[in-house]
Image (cartoon, rainbow, N blue to C red):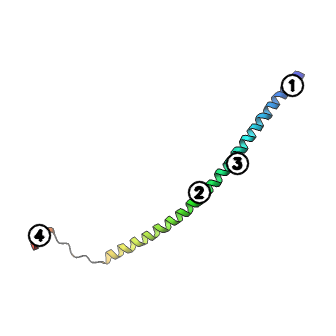
Amino acid sequence: MVRRKTIMAKEAAAKIVEADKDITAAKKILVESAASLKKSTANCAAQKTDFKTLSEDKEKEIKGLTKAVGLIQKVKMPAKKSLLQHMQKE
């Protein structure tokens, strides 16, 4: 009976050591994950700002292009002459 208890005590001690190692590893992963989350959050905020600036710039470009197209449509272009008519004049 004593022998069995000794074996069980050694097994329990080994499990405790293994559990301590698991806890240490889990804590390390938790710290690394928290750092990664902080970094990702900062990157996300920076990208959000960049996207906002890019969107505003694109909006200005679209407005400018719309205005340019409107002006081009207002300009009356002279009727196109065929190449043959142009050559006959010369």
Q: Secondary structure at mark 2?
A: helix
Q: Position of residue 15 (x, y in %)?
A: 79, 32
Q: Which residue is at a point 62% across and 54% down the rendered structure image? A: 39
The CA distance from mark 4 to mark 1 is 114 Å
Disc 2 residue crowd, few under 14, some 14–19, many 20+, Cα 10 Å: few
In this view, the residue in front, 26 or 79, is 26
Dot label at residue 31:
3
Q: Quadrant of the C terminus?
A: bottom left
- Judged by depth in the image, the label closer to the viewer, 3 or 4, is 3
What is the three-letter code of the residue carrying label 1?
A: Thr
User: Which residue position holds label 1?
Assistant: 6
What is the three-letter code of the residue carrying label 4?
A: Met
Q: Secondary structure at mark 4?
A: helix
- Judged by depth in the image, the label closer to the viewer, 3 or 1, is 3
Q: Is residue 1 visible?
A: no
In this view, the residue in front, 71 or 20, is 20
User: Which residue position holds label 4?
Assistant: 87
The CA distance from mark 3 to mark 1 is 38 Å
Pointer 4 or 2: first along the chain:
2
